[in-house]
Image: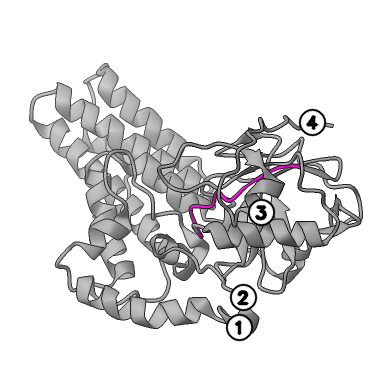
């Protein structure tokens, strides 16, 4: 019975007190409405179906909380179980990918194996590369790159819960068998379904080329050979007028809008190592400000110096550019980029307020 969900008519029949009894209960009428909406769905959209199922669950819970036990309540509880079972199944089908080892002991083994793989060519030709921070490894390994590494509401991130648990299950199976059902029972289904529906974009080679930027005689151009402008872009940290960027191991630069849970620094190179990463503000080809802010790669001073030096080598005048080394826990302050570069990434003495880049 739990493998299927009653239709509206089936539920009305199961929850009816008899043919002569008119249906007046507002809570039951609300359940009828939700079942009617669900019945009209094509069931092709994960997000739409999950949303309707959760609304059915919510309507059932409202009924049970407001009405005494009885024949109708039993039908409502059965319907609730049917809808919950279906949404669990949908969510579990979305979570697939490679195993991340078993429990805490398995995580130590995973770290030993995955870190060198992520490093790739790190350290070659005198270049120090930054690998994806351990917190974001599941984003790369889980298919569809679901953003399940951050806390959800007031609960810890799924990764941290799994790592600190005594489970014998690998991360993927743990998500499907334990975490998802538990979150649904705690009424955190909507945000969980939102996360599972999103998935961080990981670009292929053609898509990556479209995000490429390059410098010629100190001017930044996009892949269409137009002067690059960030006025119509934004990042979660700096807001409008900014873009996120990465510098690949081969010195290629890529930049794009930042959209939480959809497009991050990891998107450009599909989780591969970078030389540098951060945020950049460019006004019609001219760099006006730059930071080293990237939670996915956590760049250090050396990484920040690397991008500043590369820009300088390609004709960008660092004087007057606002530069901020975005270290965790430090107050965000901008200094003259020329001074920051000369100081090996450390702040200078000349504070600069970043100039706002306006839309075109």
Query: Which one is earlier in the sequence, the residue at label 2 or at label 3?
Result: 2
* Left or right of residue 230, residue 186 in this image: left
Could you say which disc has been placed on residue 124 in the image? 1
* Other-residue count near label 4 (Cα within 10 Å), few / some / many at <14 / 14–19 / ≥20: few
What segment carries the magenta color? 288-297
Residue 289 colored magenta? yes
Q: Are marks 2 and 3 in contact (CB under 8 Å)?
A: no
* Other-residue count near label 2 (Cα within 10 Å), few / some / many at <14 / 14–19 / ≥20: some
Q: State how far apart marks 2 and 1 are (Cα).
A: 6 Å
Q: Position of residue 92 (x, y in %)?
A: 36, 61
* Other-residue count near label 1 (Cα within 10 Å), few / some / many at <14 / 14–19 / ≥20: few
* Quadrant location of the N terminus in the rendered image: bottom left
Q: Are marks 2 and 1 in contact (CB under 8 Å)?
A: yes
Residue at the farthest left position: 69
Q: Which residue is mark 4?
A: 359
Instruction: Please tell me whether mark 2 or mark 3 is closer to you in this view.
Output: 3
Q: Which residue is mark 2?
A: 127
Could you say which disc has been placed on residue 341 in the image? 3
């Amino acid at each position: 019975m739990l493998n299927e969900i009653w239709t509206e008519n089936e539920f009305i029949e199961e929850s009816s007190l008899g043919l002569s009894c008119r249906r007046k209960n507002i809570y039951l009428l609300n359940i009828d409405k939700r079942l009617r909406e669900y019945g009209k769905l094509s069931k092709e959209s994960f997000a739409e179906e999950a949303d309707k199922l959760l609304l059915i669950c919510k309507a059932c819970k409202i009924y049970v909380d407001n009405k005494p036990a009885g024949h109708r309540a039993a039908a409502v509880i059965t319907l609730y179980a049917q809808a919950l079972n279906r949404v669990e199944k949908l969510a579990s089908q979305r979570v697939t990918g490679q195993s991340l080892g078993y429990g805490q002991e398995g995580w130590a083994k995973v770290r030993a194996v995955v870190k060198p793989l992520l490093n790739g060519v790190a350290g070659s030709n005198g270049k120090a590369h930054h690998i994806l921070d351990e917190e974001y490894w599941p984003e790369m390994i889980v298919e569809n790159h679901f953003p399940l590494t951050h806390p959800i509401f007031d609960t810890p991130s799924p990764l941290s819960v799994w790592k600190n648990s005594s489970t014998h299950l690998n991360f993927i199976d743990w998500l499907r068998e334990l975490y998802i059902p538990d979150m649904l029972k705690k009424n955190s289904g909507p945000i969980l379904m939102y996360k599972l529906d999103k998935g961080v974009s990981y670009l292929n080679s053609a898509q990556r080329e479209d995000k490429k930027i390059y410098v010629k005689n100190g001017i930044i151009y996009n892949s269409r050979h137009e002067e690059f402008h960030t006025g119509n872009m934004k990042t979660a940290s700096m807001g409008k007028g900014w873009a996120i960027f990465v510098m690949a191991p081969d010195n290629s630069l890529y930049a794009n809008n930042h959209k939480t849970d959809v497009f991050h620094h990891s998107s450009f190179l599909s989780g591969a190592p970078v030389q540098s990463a951060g945020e950049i503000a460019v006004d019609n080809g001219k760099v006006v400000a730059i930071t080293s802010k990237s939670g996915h790669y956590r760049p250090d001073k050396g990484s920040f110096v690397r991008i500043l030096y590369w820009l300088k080598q390609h004709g960008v005048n660092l004087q007057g550019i606002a530069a901020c080394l975005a270290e965790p826990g430090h107050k965000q302050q901008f200094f003259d980029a020329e001074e920051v570069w000369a100081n090996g990434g450390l702040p200078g003495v000349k504070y600069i307020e970043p100039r706002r880049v306006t839309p075109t």
